[in-house]
Amino acid sequence: MINIVLYQPEIPQNTGNIIRTAMAIGARVHLIKPLGFSLDEKSLLRASMDYIDEVDITEYEDYQDFLNKNPNCNLFFVTRYASSVHSDFDFSDVTKDYYFMFGKESSGIPYDILKDHDDKLLRIPMMINARSLNLSNSVAIVVYEALRQQEYYNLATFETIKGEDFLKKVGK
């Protein structure tokens, strides 16, 4: 299972969009406090649509609380300081839980957390003068690479609401 770990997220719209993505892929969301908003904030609810109640969301008091409640989790850290690209890692085993940590919008994941995990640091390639990508976009890029490697296990690869042949039927 995919687990999205947000370290001290600051912008409710980003977290709302991430919750929406989590619902669409069946992922869990882990929020490490302090948060820059409350979970009932209007802008978060608007961005997450009505999916917030359909997603397994767990809050933690701090990073140590997260580690205590998720011992030995298979945790990867998304950071611009990594020397390995996110697609270089093998996330293909659908029986494993993968945890992807993303840092707060203003400053990322602290050095004290990153320093001991060199083999679990991954980056998203971008232009050399780019400092970062939007948080919710970064989450989507990384988790969809993991899902691609898993051949979109348990996800629909065709239209299920209006029917697989919807476009063919509309034109007639």
Image: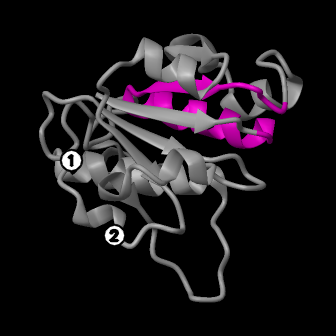
Q: Quadrant for residue 30, please give it.
A: top right
Q: At which x and y percent is residue 23?
A: 48, 26
Residue 148 is left or right of residue 166, and the answer is left
93, above or below 88, in the image: above
Image quadrant where one finds the N terminus: top left
- Circle 2/circle 1 CB separation < 8 Å: no
163, above or below 61, in the image: below
Q: Read off the magenta span.
A: 10-36
Residue 106 is left or right of residue 144, and the answer is right
Is 33 one of the magenta-colored residues?
yes
Could you tell me if residue 172 is visible in this image?
no
Is 69 one of the magenta-colored residues?
no
Amino acid of disc 2: Ser
Label 2: which residue?
84
Label 1: which residue?
91
Task: Tell me what residue is drawn at x 57 percent, y 32 percent.
Answer: 20
Task: Tell me what residue is drawn at x 73 percent, y 52 percent.
Answer: 105
Circle 2 residues within 10 Å: few <14, some 14–19, many ≥20: some
Task: Tell me what residue is drawn at x 36 percent, y 50 percent.
Answer: 144
Q: Secondary structure at mark 2?
A: loop
Circle 1 residues within 10 Å: few <14, some 14–19, many ≥20: some
Q: Earlier in the sequence, mark 2 or mark 1?
A: 2
Q: Secondary structure at mark 1?
A: loop
- In terms of depth relative to the viewer, which is nearer, 13 or 67? 67
